[in-house]
Amino acid sequence: MEQLFSNKINILKALAILIVISGHLEFSLIPMFPPYSFQVILFFFIAGMLFKEKYGFIEYFKRRFKTLMIPYILYCITYLGITSAIAPVVGKFWGMDISLRNEILIPFLTGHQLDLISPLWFVPQLFTTLIVYKILNYIKLNTWFRAIIYLIFVFIGIQMEPLCGNLYILWFARTLFSLFFVHLGYLFIHKIEGKFDIFNYKILSGVLILQAFLWLTNADYTPSDGIGLSYILVWADFDHWLAPVLTSLTGIWISLFVVEVSYNYVKDWKFLHKIGQNTYHIMANHLLVFNFITYTILAIKGIPFDIRNAHDIYWFYCPMKTTYFYFIAGIIITTYLGEFFKFIKKNLCTKKF
């Protein structure tokens, strides 16, 4: 039973990171459910599924710092070097000015101190949310009543949007919003899964109908990209007071549903499990791979780098032709980068032992 849970979680993590990468390439991996309407919050939900009450606060803090923040710090140091090294070559420093504030404090406030690892912004936020969740968990309340309180926090966080020009308030608002989805993951594992049938086709029909109505709330839809329904959690940029909550819920449900109905067909696909085991490394490195491909194409074609540098870090060459090449290449390269890093770590630990 434990192995089944572990395998399903791993496949869900793989699906989650594939959804993130598809969002950064501006296409929807699951039709009707655009990535930016739930992609990041799905990782908070997964963290809630994996939350363990058995650890005391100090032990839990140390474990989360080791698994989340130590790799983040190492990536920040590495990418500060990479960004500095490539700046003279490509003609642009992809990041904020180097300072103690930008390298120590900004990772928690925005996570956009370095453009190439900006997708990792959610790691310090996830760490913050999990620590706050652990602290609040010491308040003895009924699990369902606690869910109601966290849901109230969500709407408070959304209403704080006008104040989020202050980065400390932004950090607080994101924490309020994300606590509910961590608890929802915990609630799903302990109170819902195996007790209620939530993956039947009647519910699927209801979710699809609700999603169709949610498309009417679009504030960012344009026919050229077809993404729509997005809210930007990193900036607490909510276009609607209710739609972000509902699209998060429908996105989480459809992700769980996809894993549920496909599990027997994909459970033995080793590469899919490798993706799920390397989500951190994929998240950290895919923009570097995308930009390496872009600059290489421009160099081969003799196109000045200034054309690329005039756009943001997510711009890529000729999307009508190259989107799926970027997608496949990015997933494969970053997955095996993660495998390589784990191989190095394992060998270093063995030699140390």
Image (spheres, rainbow, N blue to C red):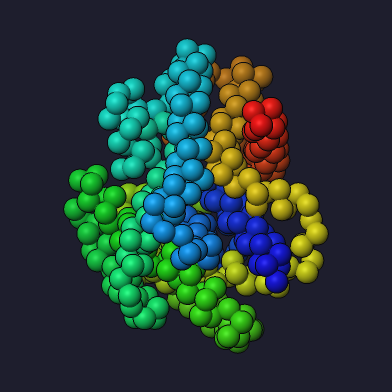
**Which residue is the extreme one toward the front?**
353
Report x, y in % for residue 39: 50, 57
Residue 1 appears in the picture as rendered:
yes
Q: Residue at left 40%, top 78%?
A: 143
Q: How many marks?
A: 0
Residue 229 at x, y = what percent?
A: 44, 62
Seen at 50% across and 26% down, the residue is: 78
- Against 109, residue 348 (above or below) is above
Q: Outermost residue toward the top?
A: 88
Nearer to the camera, 318 or 188: 188
Instruction: State the image quarter where residue 318 is shown.
Output: top right
Q: Residue at x 69, y 27 (%)?
A: 351
The spot of residue 12 in percent (x, y) is 62, 61
* Residue 181 picture location, percent across and down: 43, 66
In the image, residue 59 above or below residue 342: below
Quadrant location of the N terminus?
bottom right
- Location of residue 103 by image quarter: top left
Q: Quadrant of the C terminus?
A: top right
Q: Is residue 182 left or right of residue 283?
A: left
Does residue 129 appear in this view?
no
Q: Residue at x 47, y 74 (%)?
A: 187
- Residue 313 position (above or below residue 41): above
Q: Is residue 74 left or right of residue 220?
A: right
